[in-house]
Image (tube, helix red, strand yellow):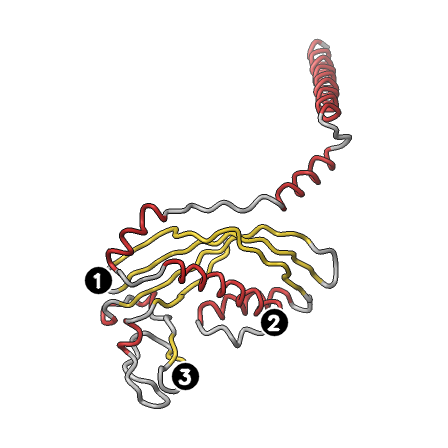
Amino acid sequence: MPFLIGVLILIIFILVSYLYIKNKIKKIMRAYGFSSIQQIIEKTELENEDLPKSLSSMDCVYLERVKKDFPNVNINELKRMSEKLILDFLNAIQKKDSSNLKNEKIKAYADSKISELKNKRISYSSVKFHKTVLSKYEKSQATATIYLGSSLEYFYQENMGIKRKIQDRYKLEFIYVIDSSKVPESKKVLEINCPNCGSPLKSSLTQKCAYCGTPNIEVAKRVWICNDIIRY
């Protein structure tokens, strides 16, 4: 009997606490002009639509090192190239056609996104870049790598439904081949075009073009090549 009384008292205490907390939450919500939890969720979602994704800019840390190692590199040009590649990537997904993407890794990523869409029709419109920053720089005996991060927004529409504003961000990896004989397996997906016939070269280690025989190894050493794109 004493045990049952104790359980009953505990249940009453929990109910009273619940009602007290519930009333407190309602008062706080009314004070801020909300009538339900759903309104708070909707307001938060609207605020997130206008809040750009954050980026870790490391320009002040890495820019001088990049300029010291590569005096002729134009970081602003790479940033613009990065934004163009993101637009090409989104356009490929929208059109469900990745044939214009030159890099095999980026093309494969786009193809996976296209596969996920199945029969859905989607569109990206009013794409706006907030900023593009230098986020990381690495250099080894084989390659130098610049990582650029981009924060952007666009309106996303699916199957002619409601357009939703999306805040997004991407990271792109640019590789410069210093010594192709030391390029690790993970970097051998680098792809460039033959300067003579325009055919794609499957690896930066390719000694000559398989189509016209033009030597290409030195071409890979003279340019920054986008090797990967990551949404994060």
Q: Where residue 64 sits in the image (x, y, percent)?
A: 28, 51
Say which amino acid is labelled 1.
Gln
Residue 29, quarter of the rendered image? top right
Q: Quadrant of the N terminus?
A: top right
Q: Mark 3 = which residue?
A: 199
Q: Residue at x 33, y 85 (%)?
A: 209
Q: Mark 2 = which residue?
A: 96
Q: Residues within 10 Å of mark 3 (few under 14, many from 20)?
A: some
Q: Residue at x 78, y 30 (%)?
A: 35
Identify the mark nearer the N-term, 2 or 1: 2
> Cα distance, mark 2 to mark 1?
39 Å
> Cα distance, mark 3 to mark 1?
28 Å
Instruction: Name the mark on residue 224.
Output: none
Contact between labelled residues 1 and 3, with CB atoms less than 8 Å apart: no
> Cα distance, mark 3 to mark 2?
23 Å
Which type of secondary structure does the marked residue at label 2 adopt? loop
